[in-house]
């Protein structure tokens, strides 16, 4: 993907994402807060992720430790 397209995508994510992002695990034992735009957001459709999430995909996010 061209750098301009990545800049556009990153800018769109930055504009649409309301920070901080907060969430947690389904059992409520773990809570998290992300305070800055993630470096990457990944969607996986592999068989393991389908079974693990019980849905069509899993969603993962990469960020610096200082923002998590
Ligand atoms: Zn997967």
Image (cartoon, rainbow, N blue to C red):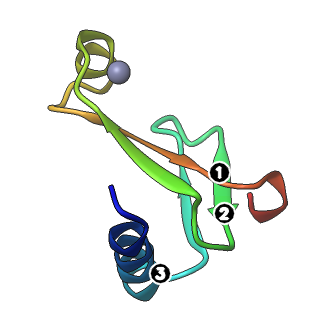
- Single out the mark in the foreground, 3 or 2: 3
The residue under label 3 is 14
Circle 2 — which element? strand
The residue under label 1 is 31
Q: What residue occupies the far right of the structure in this picture? A: 66
* Crowd class of label 3 (few under 14; some 14 to 19; many from 20; radius 10 Å): some
Q: Quadrant of residue 28?
A: top right
Picture residue at 52% right of the left edge, 48% below the top: 61
Picture residue at 32% right of the left edge, 11% below the top: 48
Q: Is residue 40 left or right of residue 39?
A: left
Callouts 2 and 1 close, C-beta under 8 Å: yes
Q: Is residue 67 left or right of residue 42?
A: right
Picture residue at 81% right of the left edge, 52% below the top: 65
Question: Whereabouts is ligand 1, in terms of quadrant?
Answer: top left
Q: Out of 44 and 24, give the one closest to the viewer.
A: 44
* Crowd class of label 2 (few under 14; some 14 to 19; many from 20; radius 10 Å): few
Q: Is residue 34 above or below residue 55?
A: below
Disc 1 residue lies near ligand 1 with CB under 8 A: no
Residue 25 image point, x, y percent: 52, 40
**For the residues marked 1 and 3, what is the alpha-carbon distance in whole angstroms?**
22 Å
Question: Of the numbered discs in the image, which one, if any, rests on residue 33?
Answer: 2
Residue 24 image point, x, y percent: 55, 49
- Single out the mark in the foreground, 2 or 1: 2
Image quarter where the C terminus lies is bottom right
Along the polypeptide, which appears first: circle 3 or circle 2? 3
């Amino acid at each position: 993907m061209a750098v301009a397209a990545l800049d556009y995508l990153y800018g769109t994510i930055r504009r649409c994402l309301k920070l901080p992002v907060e969430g947690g695990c389904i059992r409520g034992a773990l809570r998290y807060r992300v305070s800055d735009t993630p470096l990457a957001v990944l969607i996986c459709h592999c068989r393991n992720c389908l079974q693990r999430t019980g849905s069509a995909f899993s969603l993962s996010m990469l960020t610096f430790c200082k923002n998590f």
